[in-house]
Amino acid sequence: MEYVTYEEFKKMDIRIGTIREIEPVPETDKLLRCQIDFGDKNEAGESVLRQIISGIREFYPEYEKLIGKQVLYIVNLEPRKIKGFESNGMLMAVDGVDGAPVFLVPEGIVPVGSKVR
């Protein structure tokens, strides 16, 4: 196991986001293009969603059921192009008993954008 310092850990910005839109990335079997609400607003006060590409499609054939789900994300990762789409964060999950991802979720509803501390 490689250790990180507490100062390194504090650099990670981990927040609760709500999945608002989700669709498959064309020509892939594993990727979903997710639009996540972290509570950000533009100058007009309208919600601004963040696009995050997640490799979970094979485990969620009925991925539409994920809309409205609150999940943990790392939001301060450097943006990355995946199959032509920019991904601006990373979904946090653990491997379940059968290898399928298990989301890390709040025990109750929390405001979007709530920061892990």
Image (spheres, rainbow, N blue to C red):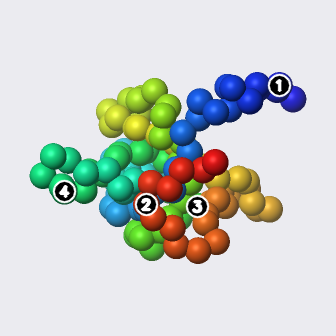
Q: Which amino acid lies under the numbered mark 3 shown in the image of this protein?
A: Phe
- The residue shown at (12%, 52%) is 44
Q: Badge 1 is on which residue?
A: 2
Cα separation, mark 4 vs mark 2, equals: 14 Å
Q: Badge 4 is on which residue?
A: 46
Mark 1 or mark 4: whose residue is earlier in sequence: 1
Q: Which mark is residue 57?
A: none
Mark 1 or mark 3: whose residue is earlier in sequence: 1
Give the total number of marks visible in the rendering.
4
Q: Which amino acid lies under the numbered mark 2 shown in the image of this protein?
A: Val
- The residue shown at (44%, 54%) is 113
Judge the density around disc 1: few (<14), some (14-19), many (≥20) Cα neighbours within 10 Å. Answer: few
Q: Which amino acid lies under the numbered mark 1 shown in the image of this protein?
A: Glu
SS under mark 1: loop
Q: Badge 2 is on which residue?
A: 112
SS under mark 4: loop
SS under mark 2: loop
